[in-house]
Image (tube, coloured by chain):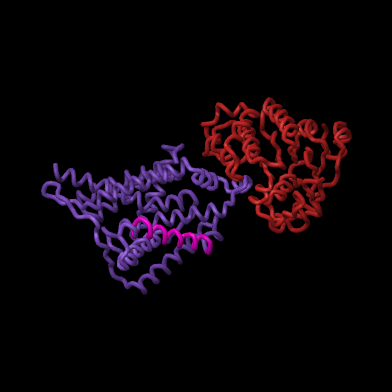
Amino acid sequence: MALLEIHDLRAAYGHVPILHKIDMHVEQGEFVGVLGHNGMGKTTLLRAIMGFVTTKGGRIVYQDQEIQRLPTYRRARMGMSLVPQGREIFPNLTVLENLTVGILGKKGSLDRIDEMLEYFPRLRPLLDRRGGALSGGEQQILAIARCLCNHPSLILLDEPTEGVQPSIIHEISEVLQKLQGQQNLTIVLVEQNLEFIVGLASRIYTISRGVLDTEIPIDEIKDSAMVAEYLGFGA
Amino acid sequence: MDYSLVVAIELVREVAGLILIATGLAVIFGMMRVINIAHGEFMMLGGYTVVLTTKMGVNIWVAILILAPLAVGIFGVIVERCIIRHLYGRIIDSLLATWGLSLFLIGFVTVVFGNTVEGVSNPFGGFAVGQYKVAGYTFFLIFAAVAFIASVYLTLKYTKAGLIARATMQNSDMVEALGVNSKHVYMATFGIGAAFAGLAGGLLAPISGVVPGMGALLIGKAFITVVTGGAAVVAGTLSASTILGSISQAVTFATNPVYGDAALLFVALILLRLLPQGITGRIFTRSI
């Protein structure tokens, strides 16, 4: 059964159209990737699903309920969570406070923080440090842990590897695989990092100029010639 | 010796007065970045709430400590929902709208109560310090300011509501993505800032009296204190109130109140020249 279905979705910033007739479906427990160049509408797609971008038409169905008119916080309470590009942690709050805000939105238990620290032990010695004082990689881990504190059923991940050192990318990749297996999470990952997305996703959409035009089988995308054909850049 | 003691008490009272009038504005301007020109009139409404309710026979402490902040807080929530909510991020528009609200409130209260000073009986008597006399209410004001700023700090630092408010003011989109209705948080924060103004107006009513134009006298000092203090609500208000209040009152004692107010402005100018982000932009940067 599809957890998320998108039909004929259109979105714009003011009068500038960004997304055109997007159709997409994500099954419960699936890890789906969206691959595309800069400026093709990847981030706008995730922001439209989360409710930050006003849609100009089409439907977003989540857990069998149309949500395109719901405000962002209602979507979050239904189990959607976004890890945005640029992390957007709260810079003047400590790491512990950042994680606590992640819980409070859905009135969850503080025990969830301990659970997240088991997955991300790197954060434990940093709990009293301000979010703004962390490195880019640590901020990315914090952003993912904060989103997971919210007990999401669908995670929208926007370029989590951007500006992050390789060792932390590897750590994020491992934890995401582990979490998906253990907690049956559904994840939509937007990326330009081909190796990262191929290592995690079971299905990949490509997006070009606001159109979700091709669904590439994961075996084919490992073929660099095929990637060059679809995206114009090699693996 | 007696004179020095009286001067010291008055210095602390001036600092306490600045803390009381600036804290609400620090919440609304410092945290929410809304320039509320009507904030002085919110204080005036707090004063008139005390005048009106005590005339109706309500106990003065109930009027000052409960009814004034409650009435102005509710009024603040209505103002946020009807006016401010549509103007977040539009600084000039919100400035003009709240200026209009300020003029309306002054005119409305003048029509209802007249342009005369309404007195509120001082609930404490005075006592002698040597050959001088100090009002007992002065000590109550100092105590109230300390309790007030301490409760704001404890709320922001240690409660869930305070944490959500701080997070929302830093990044309202992200807070929404975590399931918090940021519009409710903004509304509540503005209402609390207004309630603080009502409390300040109520607390000051017994010593200054209440008049429709009193807000204009308070708003200038409140803004100067908040801007000088910087973004941190508690540390900024405390540090700026202490520096500006002490110097202003010392100069007032040495010369007269006009020079005292001029000294406050002069010191604020120097501080902002040296610390453009306010005191907490350079010092106490991790404070709330």
Quarter of the image that includes the C terminus of chain A: top right
Foreground of the two, B99 or B273: B99
Q: Residue B93: x percent and y percent?
A: 52, 61
Left or right position of B158 against A180:
left
Q: Residue B147: x percent and y percent?
A: 35, 46
Quarter of the image that includes the N terminus of chain A: top right
Q: Residue at x 32, y 73 (%)?
A: B114
Q: Is residue A121 magenta?
A: no
**Prevalent SS, magenta region:** helix
| Magenta region, residue range | B63-82
Q: Is residue B272 visible?
A: no
Q: Residue B266: x percent and y percent?
A: 32, 49
Q: Residue at x 74, y 42 (%)?
A: A38
Question: Looking at the colours in the rendered structure, which chain would you say is drawn in red?
Answer: A
Question: Looking at the colours in the rendered structure, which chain would you say is drawn in purple?
Answer: B
Left or right position of B123 against A163:
left
Task: Work out which residue is located at the far bottom of the displayed protein and give it.
Answer: B111
Q: Is residue A108 visible?
A: yes
